[in-house]
Amino acid sequence: MRELVELLVGSLILRPYVFAFLALYLLAAVGEWGPRRAAAFTGLAWGLAFGAEWTSTRIGVPFGLYHYTGLTRGRELYLGNVPFFDSLSFTFLAYASLGLARFVLERWRGPAPGRATLAVATGILMTWLDLVIDPLAVRGERWFLGRIFYYPEPGFYFGVPLANFVGWAVLGGLVAGLWLVLGGRVGGGPPAWAARLPGRPYHAVTLYYVVLAFNLAVTAAVAEPALFWAGCAAHAPLAAIVVSCVASLRRTVHAGGAA
């Protein structure tokens, strides 16, 4: 037990940004769903992500074949050959992508987008984030991530193979699809204090862009101008859509208040 605690503390010390995002996610998820449903979503997303990483590092499905170097083994928690923090990251990435997908689709297609549409949109939006995340992670030796993994056969997009992006889309869609079917069966509701949280409709959207901004900022800092501008260009159309949706929601709220 003492060794486990030390490794968890080591994970926190080595990856404080991951746990900061995790804390923001838990605050938003508990505020939206309540602690029981937030815990259920966390378990679902983490379990599927860990399974995907476990198989990908062995047979290349679904992310394509890659390997962890084990550079930080003994300093942070590993589950088998996979660093704990890595699969844990998919919990807040999936939540943010699902929330953003719902936010945009509700503005465009009405208050009840279909489950399949929402699941597919979640997978796409999570992959959209990965257009910045994984190319930066491959260059981990240039910043505080470290060289924790590598692709035996680097891909065409800044060293990341196409299979990786396909895998992210599949995983994001699977997490969202299963949650949309099963999440309503988990009991509980948001706590009373959640009603006092400011900006409740924007929590997932904000988390999505906080993660994106962090990765773009680190990309710029490690002198990858081509990757930085590619990430900005990829996300500019999506950002324009989100800004339009926010403006639409504010007009609706304002009109309702005036009435």
Image (spheres, rainbow, N blue to C red):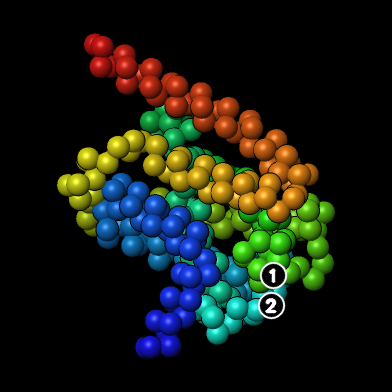
The answer to whether one can see residue 34 in this image is: yes
Image spot of residue 232 (x, y percent): 67, 38
Q: What x and y, as percent, mark residue 151? A: 76, 68
Q: Residue at x 75, y 49 (%)?
A: 224
Q: Where is 232 relative to 79, above or below?
A: above
Image coordinates for residue 256, horizontal then vertical, percent: 28, 17
* Marked residue nearer the N-terminal end (1 or 2): 2
What residue do we see at 56% from left, 74% from top?
83
Determine which quarter of the picture holds residue 159.
Answer: bottom right
Q: Return the residue nearer the eye: 147 or 63.
A: 147
The local secondary structure at tag 2 comes to loop
**Residue 87 in view (yes/no):** no
Check residue 69 in the rendering and tell me which mark sits there, or answer none.
2
* Residue at figure coordinates x 78%, y 53% from the top left: 158
Residue 114, picture quadrant: top left
Q: Is residue 231 left or right of residue 184?
A: right
- Category of crowding for the residue at label 1, using alpha-carbon neighbours closer than 10 angstroms: few (below 14), some (14–19), many (at least 20): some
Q: Quadrant of residue 37?
A: bottom left
Looking at the image, residue 35 sits to the left or right of residue 135; the answer is left
The answer to whether mark 1 and mark 2 are in CB contact below 8 A is yes
Of marks 1 and 2, the one in the foreground: 1
Dot label at residue 147: 1
Amino acid type assigned to the residue bearing label 2 in the image? Thr
Asked which secondary structure carries label 1, the reply is loop
In the rendered structure, find residue 41 and report the number of the disc placed on it: none
**Foreground residue, 117 or 100?**
100
